[in-house]
Amino acid sequence: MAPSHHDPRRPYKRAAISDQQRRRDSALRTQSARRADAQARARSLANSLLSPPSSSSNDQPVPSPEAHGDEPAVADVATAAAKLRGPDQRRWFARQIMLPEWMVDAPPHLARDWHVCARPAGKRCLVVSSNGITISRLRNGTILHRFPSALPNGSKRGISGPASSYSILDCIFHEPDETYYIVDMICWRGYSLYDCTAEFRFFWVNSKLTETSAGDPPSTYHRYRFTAVPMYESTLEGLQAAYSLTTPYVKDGLLFYNKHAHYESGITPLTLVWKDEACSQYVLDTDSEGQVPTEQHVVLELQEDGKLITSDDPPIVFGGLSSDFIQKSNLRPGNLLRFSLRDESVKLVDGKMEIGELQFAGRLNRSRTFADSHSKVLFQYAARHAPLRIEDLVASVQSNSMEVESTDIEMRD
């Protein structure tokens, strides 16, 4: 509800219900401190994406290319990743992609500090081109396509520079028009962009793509078209364009990128996804039959001690199961489980959800990679009760503009 003493000259901004902004400020402060050897990270990821599956099993953890001190050799990381199987493989590859939090509250300075685009519906994947071949892998590590492309060294035709030089793109494959829509760039011709700002990465996506024929219609040496997703400043005009303009692809919400954010693997509050019924077919989660359940469902991961956690880092505990129930239900640590929650069991404490009671609804199939994040659970809860609307985003942008104008007037006075 709007406050009773609201100034009618200023647009009403929905009150914050989460700690998202606090964590976003912390992420911006610490990203430079986490800076690792960007080239080593890019090489290890490229080799892992290109590595063929190994027939042998491996129970050893994959060395991290981001570790400080004595870094493992790139080949060691790639080889270890290729030997992973099942849940371990799915988790490792899924953690290489920068994943957005769900926008629960509109960030301050939305127009000044953020880009926005209409997110294509489709399969999120990483695409690497090197040695005359192009390979795309889904978040779970499964190869989506192996094909020739017009990306640098992406086919046997027109290899320039070292054949082993690689490029890595963060894409969404849109099946209706068989197009890879580029939402980010990790590496181009061996030059890593991990530690570059989002603003610079988007500039490179557009400038470097025009140097190739990757955007041309498919041909013998170019199986799929690549197109950069139109990116806008999060001004009123940009927000309206991303939200309302017709796109060649089916929309699935809006993606927001903090201009100053580096490419951070895993879930980050510096990238956000937001949806409503006008820009996405799926705002509320559905059950196995495609229907929106009466009660909200959440997906959590079972731990060895019976705790149920989210996919956040660090994870948030949303309850637990007794050892008797785990044994009777034949559950194992690492299983992804679905639960329903009643509205009366939910509390918001210091920007986080606390759930008093969970109702077990079943085990998920193995294709699912991660549990829900806290921001997704909170977004789904808010969408059922007090959704963040497009009008709230517009009000946030307008409020930012009025603050800038007020500051300008004060400086002139």
Image (cartoon, grey):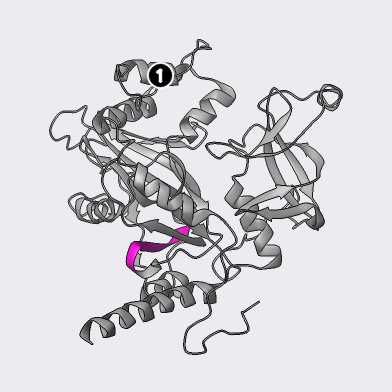
Q: Where is residue 138 shown, x and y percent of the image?
A: 48, 38
Q: Main secondary structure of the magenta part?
A: strand
Whether residue 266 is in magenta: the answer is: no
- Is 393 positioned to the left or the right of 166 in the image? right
| Element under disc 1 | loop
Residue at left offset 42%, top offset 69%: 242
| 93 to 77, vertically: above or below | below
User: In terms of depth relative to the viewer, which is nearer, 323 or 131?
Assistant: 323
Q: Where is residue 262 shown, x and y percent of the image?
A: 32, 46
User: What residue occupies the far left of the structure in this picture?
Assistant: 161
User: In terms of depth relative to the viewer, which is nearer, 62 or 169?
Assistant: 62
| 161 to 386, vertically: above or below | above
| 49 to 109, vertically: above or below | above
Q: Is residue 121 visible?
A: no
Q: Which of the image's four quarters has the N terminus?
A: bottom right
Choose top left, top right, bottom left or bottom right for residue 66.
top left
Q: Tell me the magenta residue range.
A: 112-120
- Count of numbered circles in the view: 1
User: What residue occupies the far front of the structure in this picture?
Assistant: 413
Q: Which of the image's four quarters has the C terminus?
A: bottom left
Residue at left offset 79%, top offset 57%: 343
Q: Where is residue 347 shown, x and y percent of the image?
A: 72, 54
User: In terms of depth relative to the viewer, which is nearer, 254 or 181?
Assistant: 254
Q: Where is residue 29 shown, x and y percent of the image?
A: 35, 47
Residue at left offset 34%, top offset 35%: 34
Q: Which residue is mark 1?
A: 63
Residue at left offset 22%, top offset 39%: 152
User: In terms of depth relative to the viewer, which is nearer, 202 or 102?
Assistant: 102
- Is 270 positioned to the left or the right of 46 in the image? right
For the residue carrying disc 1, how many other residues have a C-alpha within 10 Å: few (<14), some (14-19), or many (20+)? some
Q: Is residue 370 visible?
A: yes
* Amino acid type, label 1: Pro
